[in-house]
Amino acid sequence: MRILKRAAAIGLSMAMAFLAGCGASEKPAEPKAVKTERKKVALVCDVAGTQVFVLTMIDGLKASAEKYGFDYVIAECADSAAYEDNCRAVLEEGADLIIGGGWQAADSISKIAAEYPDRADYALIDSVVDVDNVKCISYREQEGAYLIGKIAGMVTDGDSELFGAIHVSQSASSFKWRWGYMEGVKSEKPDAKFVFNYVGSYNDPAKAKEYAIQQYEQGCQFINSAAAGGDKGVFEAAKEKGFYTSGQDIDLTSPDNPWIITCQIKDTYATVEYLTDQYFSDKWTTENESLGTAEGTIGAVFVTHETENPRSDRLTDEDIKVLKETVEKIKSKEIDLSAVPDEEAYVQ
């Protein structure tokens, strides 16, 4: 299945061109659905490029289309204005289910779902909006971050108490990543201290590398990278300086860089499968859901998700056994990570 059949691609392009050409004061024409016998699912997302979060969503949609025999449309958006244009265009093309692939789609999905509640079904990945007919999928990232933190405590030397992390931004919504990581480290080293830096961008490997070197020089033996495209810079610094690190979203471990100990998994492939499994069964509802280790969407490489890449000698068979037991404790809430505290209160 190609992303679009030729005729559909032409129609989508014409629709987008028309909408983009409308003046700001003009009200867009109401889309006219083109329904066919086969169901059609549309993914409206950021430009894929090298963004693994988006690329794996696309792969998940393709796999689901093979499984259920539906047509699919992938509408990549170069800027915020394109999201609404593309949502309207895929609605006109007869999409039965429109999936917003990331928080950038939230406003547009909300608007279109409110305007045309009976024309399609709507879902949003990695964000939550207060719209009754939009099914929102969020994640319990703190569960995967806890595993990363626990691994960090396991692989560092006994006298190491300073741990680093490099993130995209210090937003309130991303505190669950930092909190989970800190709690995981403290499960191994209760007196641990932390250094956080924020690159302020989804793709700044140079700044991420600079921060990583600074953290290493302060004494961090493990630096968790959650800098999106900036992870590459942290990995380069780890290889040059010899500190342990981890990445995000997919398996970024490599036989060429033994310092990448693991990666926190945020499996958008499995998320799209989860949504389409529900949609093409009798389980579809618009109730919001939060996915984590129990649903197989959140985890860590070598623990919940396997890889063909070699495992570091610093992460032993006994460590893996303990980590797998930890996953079960998270699932059962023996280790309860469901209530993320307020950041200001936590760091005091």
Image: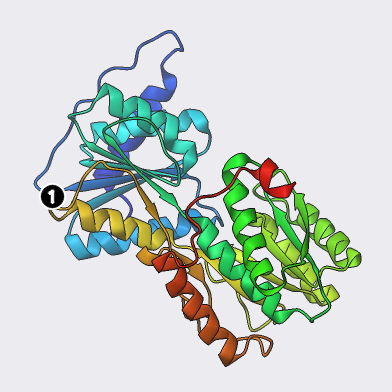
291 up-or-down from 171: above or below? below
300 up-or-down from 290: above or below? below
Look at 24% across and 31% down and name the residue there.
92
Residue 147, x across and y down, in percent: 57, 70
User: Would you name the residue on which mark 1 appears?
Assistant: 38
Provide the secondary structure element on which disc 1 rests.
Answer: loop
Look at 22% across and 54% down and name the residue there.
278
Residue 190, x across and y down, in percent: 72, 68
Count of picture labels: 1
Look at 43% across and 74% down and name the residue there.
328
Closest to the observer: 63 or 163? Answer: 163
Closest to the observer: 296 or 82? Answer: 296
Residue type at mark 1 is Arg
81 up-or-down from 74: above or below? above
Closest to the observer: 305 or 95? Answer: 305
Q: Quadrant of the N terminus?
A: bottom left
Look at 67% across and 50% down and name the residue there.
203
Residue 333, x across and y down, in percent: 43, 64
Closest to the observer: 288 or 86? Answer: 288
Q: Is residue 299 visible?
A: yes
Q: Is residue 169 visible?
A: no
Few, some or many C-alpha atoms within 10 Å of disc 1 (few <14, some 14-19, many ≥20)?
few
Query: Viewed as shown, does residue 119 lie left or right of 306?
Result: left
